[in-house]
Amino acid sequence: MVVWSIFRFNSGREMANRFAIAPLTTDSSNDDGTVTENELEFVRRRAASGFGATISSAAYVEQDGRAWQGIGATHDGHLSSLRRLAEAMRAAGGLAILQIYDGGRIAKPELIGEQCLRAPSAVASLRPGAKTPRAMTANEVGNLIASFGEAASRARKAGFDGVEIHGANHYAVHQFFSPRANHRVDNWGGTLSKRMNFPLAVAQAVRDALGPKSIAGFRITPFESERGGYTLEDAKLLCSELAKLDLDYISVSLDDYRMSRPVSETRVYDGPVEISYTPAESPITEFARVIAGRSAVMASGGIKTCIDAEGAIKKGADLVAIGRAVVVDPEWLSKVRSKSEASILAGLPKDELEIAKALSIPPRMVEYLLSRPGWIPRL
Ligand SMILES: Cc1cc2nc3c(=O)[nH]c(=O)nc-3n(C[C@H](O)[C@H](O)[C@H](O)COP(=O)(O)O)c2cc1C
């Protein structure tokens, strides 16, 4: 079966199978952005089941872009923490990839101070209670691009095999590409081609910092569900430009790989969602066609069995990323490999203490998971 075969990236690095652990924020780092023992244990135990690659929870590249209590990659003081994380992620010899992000308008005011909230434009997110950010100056935009590059250099120094740019899920890179969030009229906004400039500049900065022999990936939300958002056609054009930068992979972030729909900005907060359209074909298939083998395609969303993984690959993916299934069952991949899928845990135990202890999930992450009803199944 394809899912168990080796995959070789443009950079020459190899995944021993097609399964990656999706980026999963534990919300459990120290205040200074260093990794905690709890987080290391969460990752080590899951990576030990033999994933071809593990992608880290997203690390912030600037202090003012922090959207949760996560890991940082903003200065060399973070290097030893990043090194420990990379080692834990390689528990079974798989590749270690650091995801990097900036929160933009959905950074957390409690962490950064409300007056520090900055974004492409002074437009608040649709999330209930969202604060209005101030628009970044052109200088700040340039600095943020440089910060992505510097974080990528730190990842390389800390021993990661590569970096994934978090261009999805409504964070800053996504905001620059979105006509809903980006109302700028300078080089960074206005037309579709100018809205592409920030994601492309970040991808170039990361590739330059890594050199050709490390993995550079980019995660994208394939279209915005909200009216007035960017369309699948827009995102395909961006992917086509990204593929020219010799990226190793483009990761398509979906809620469910079968349903073609990405996560909307307000979904988990029960806010109003205006659905504008559903594409006729899977975005995975559409992106694979546009990218045409120049970069690999990674797919995620609702993959819970080997048949699901094969299904995503049939739609055009080369690789699959597994999120909630591996949160709920740390030994998910070993069970899939040994054809013991019937024994896979289907939900989190009722008892919260048991969740933390039996499944090696940091207590803050347990709180975070349970704060969004319906997000993760319960037994
Ligand atoms: C607890 C949790 C934390 C997450 N953190 C991140 C993150 O840091 N970066 C990211 O790109 N996606 C993040 N995601 C999204 C997942 O990577 C994945 O795309 C999503 O859960 C859908 O895949 P799944 O159905 O396999 O869970 C997170 C998801 C969960 C459940």
Image (cartoon, helix red, strand yellow):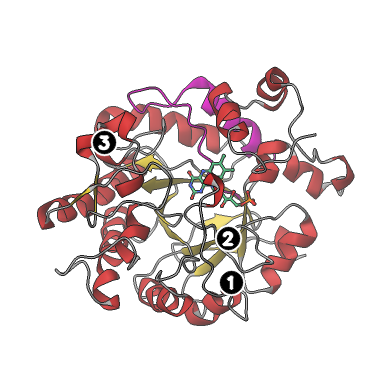
Is label 2's Cβ within 8 Å of ligand 1? yes
Q: Position of residue 73 (x, y in %)?
A: 32, 37
Query: Do we see residue 50 in this rendering?
Result: no
Residue type (three-letter) at the residue carrying disc 2 = Leu
Q: Are marks 2 and 1 in contact (CB under 8 Å)?
A: yes
In the drawing, does residue 375 fall left or right of residue 63? right
Q: Which residues are magenta?
A: 21-50
**Tally of marks:** 3
How many C-alpha atoms fall within 10 Å of the one at disc 3: few (<14), some, or many (≥20)? some
Q: Can you give x and y, in whole percent of width and height, for residue 192 in the image? A: 30, 76
Do we see residue 251 in this rendering? yes
User: In which quadrant of the rendered image does the N terminus lie?
Assistant: bottom right
Q: CA distance from mark 3 to mark 2?
A: 28 Å
Q: Is residue 198 above or below residue 129?
A: below
The answer to whether the residue labelled 3 contacts the one labelled 2, judged by CB atoms less than 8 Å apart, is no
Q: Counting residues from the N terminus, which is met first, the one under dot 1 or under dot 3?
A: 3
Q: Which residue is mark 1?
A: 284
**Helix, strand or loop at mark 3:** helix
- Residues under labels 1 and 3: Cα distance? 33 Å
Q: Which residue is mark 3?
A: 63
